[in-house]
Amino acid sequence: MTLPENHPRLFKRAYSRGELIADGLVHAVAIVAGLIAFAALIGRVARQGDLSDTLAIGVYAASFFLLFGFSMAYNMTPPSNLKWILRRFDHASIYLMISGTYTALLSQLPNDTLAWTLAAIVWFVSLGGAALKILLPGRFDRAAIVVYLALGWMAIFAAKQLVVILPAPTMFLLVVGGVFYSVGVLFYKWNSLKYQNAIWHSFVAIAAGCQYAGIAQAIGHSA
């Protein structure tokens, strides 16, 4: 149930109590904000009677809470076999969050062929990556970071169609969110920095918030 022998995570410095509290607060704020935001969005879309949008936002919401839920559980659990099990699902849920975000975004594209093709690719890679994280914990960690970023920026292949159909503020917020995710990786790797984990998760929360705002506006715009 543990990580491979000599895995760098086993030798990572222990976080202070203050760092753990700060990191826990970041997660708690993100989860509470998500409960409020997604309840409002799902309620609005459901009242409009668009089943496809409702289902897409439902998948998006589920991926959001899986990400922050497993992340909080993993990061707040002391070193133990349970922690390393939670680490598998924490890392796997990153793939699901990327796919869930794409599901909500691509549901707004009028070009069904392009939307389904991109969705199929993203979900295929994400499910494969998540399976590797769960079945082969601690392996391919560096490669996984590259895959996370590549999947996140894969939307550039649909940029032309997205610019046409989506309002400008949505495109801006999606890009800003992507930048926050990408820059946050630097803090994820900066292990010696005080409050590094809380800073990294703050970048993730801000990025998720930006992209949620963009998607919420796009769905309201298309309606």
Image (spheres, helix red, strand yellow):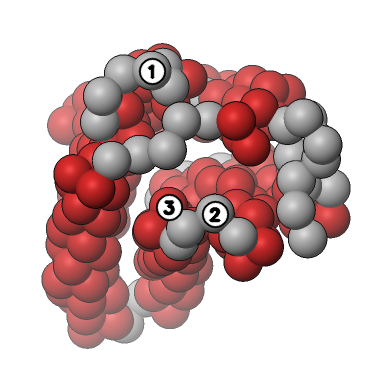
For residue 141, which quarter of the picture? top right
Q: Is residue 160 above or below residue 95?
A: above
Q: Are marks 3 and 2 in contact (CB under 8 Å)?
A: no
Q: Tell me the kind of residue under disc 2.
A: Pro
Residue 79 circle label: 2
Q: Residue, x 60% and y 60% (percent of image)?
A: 80
Residue 18 in the image: state x and y as whole percent. Answer: 18, 44
> Element under label 1?
loop
> Where does the image place residue 116, in percent across and percent down from the top left?
66, 50
Q: Nearer the viewer, mark 3 or mark 2?
A: 2
Q: Which residue is mark 1?
A: 192
Disc 2 is placed on an element classified as loop
- Between 130 and 164, the one lying in front of the other is 130
Question: Looking at the rendered structure, which numbered label has been put on residue 48?
Answer: none
Mark 2 / mark 1, whichever is N-terminal: 2
- Residue 45: image quadrant is bottom left
Q: Is residue 82 left or right of residue 107?
A: right
- Amino acid type for the residue under numbered disc 1: Ser
Q: Is residue 24 left or right of residue 186?
A: left
- Quarter of the image with the N terminus is bottom right
Q: Nearer the viewer, mark 3 or mark 1?
A: 1
Q: Which residue is mark 3?
A: 75
Report x, y in % for residue 91.
60, 47
In the image, taking residue 160 as reference, residue 111 lies left or right, namely: right
Q: For marks 3 and 2, give the CA distance.
A: 9 Å
